[in-house]
Amino acid sequence: MQKAPDIRPIVRGKARSSVEFGAKVSISLVDGFSYVDQIIWDAYNESGDLRVQIKRYKRRFGYYPESVHADKIYRTTDNRRFCKKHGIRLSGPALGRAPKDMGLLKDQKKLQRRDECDLIAVEGKFGQGKRRFSLSRIMAKLANTSEVTIMMSFIVMNLEKILSGIVSFALFLCRLLLRAMPKPPVWTVDLAYVPTEKPANAA
């Protein structure tokens, strides 16, 4: 009898583990803060999550993002068409032939490298959750309690980021105050030995 019937094997094809067990979690990373968009237990193609995440971004902030940095699996024709329709730049190499203008080609490659660096932050957030916030050891047996545990891990990560920002700002203010404070006066003491003559009536 299965203790967690909601868990399904998911074939990932990775070198370390070809099959994984657990939920697929789709998150959005905005200014270092994680937003959990979907938690699904079945194996499925997550390329369709991109439009859902973009629409939720618009509901949260009131406007569409300027750019979206996503893995290759999300760069489908439908997703490209959706992003183009709403004026969103989707990361990754542009379709078609490379431009002949070397300056333009250099700018495109520079932008691609920057997009890849931004994308690393999303993978790093999952790694942070697994290493420090027990995201790799979900011990709950029911689907709803497991989802609550996953959500709590991301909430604590966001709280830690807020706390680190407060501490950094406090240290910054302390440095400013120390620079603005007047320096105390320097008190210099100079000691010198002055020899005196021996009195004449001294024994």
Image (cartoon, helix red, strand yellow):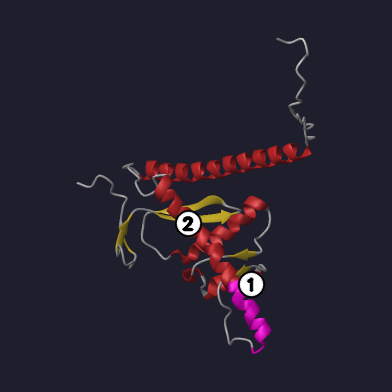
In this rendered view, identify the residue nearer to me: 163 or 5.
Answer: 163
| Residue 81 visible, this angle | no
In this rendered view, identify the residue nearer to me: 178 or 63.
Answer: 178
Disc sitting over residue 66 in the figure: none
Q: Residue at x 65, y 40 (%)?
A: 171
User: In the structure shown, which secondary structural element does the residue marked by tag 2 occupy?
Assistant: helix
* Disc 2 target residue: 124
In this rendering, would 91 be left or right of 175? left
* Disc 1 target residue: 84
Bounds of the magenta segment: 100-112
In this rendered view, identify the residue nearer to me: 92 or 56.
Answer: 92
In this rendering, would 130 be left or right of 6? right
Q: How far apart are the two marked residues, 2 and 1, measured between alpha carbons?
A: 28 Å
The relative height of residue 67 versus residue 178 in the rendered view (above or below) is below
Amino acid on which disc 2 is placed? Gly
The quadrant where residue 114 appears: bottom right
The relative height of residue 11 versus residue 177 in the rendered view (above or below) is below
Where residue 164 sits in the image (x, y, percent)? 58, 42
Judge whether residue 56 is colored magenta. Answer: no
In this rendering, would 56 be left or right of 7? right
Where residue 159 sits in the image (x, y, percent)? 54, 41
Q: Residues within 10 Å of mark 2 (few under 14, many from 20)?
A: few
Q: Earlier in the sequence, mark 2 or mark 1?
A: 1
Q: Residues within 10 Å of mark 1 (few under 14, many from 20)?
A: few
Q: Residue at x 73, y 41 (%)?
A: 176
Where residue 174 sits in the image (x, y, percent)? 69, 37
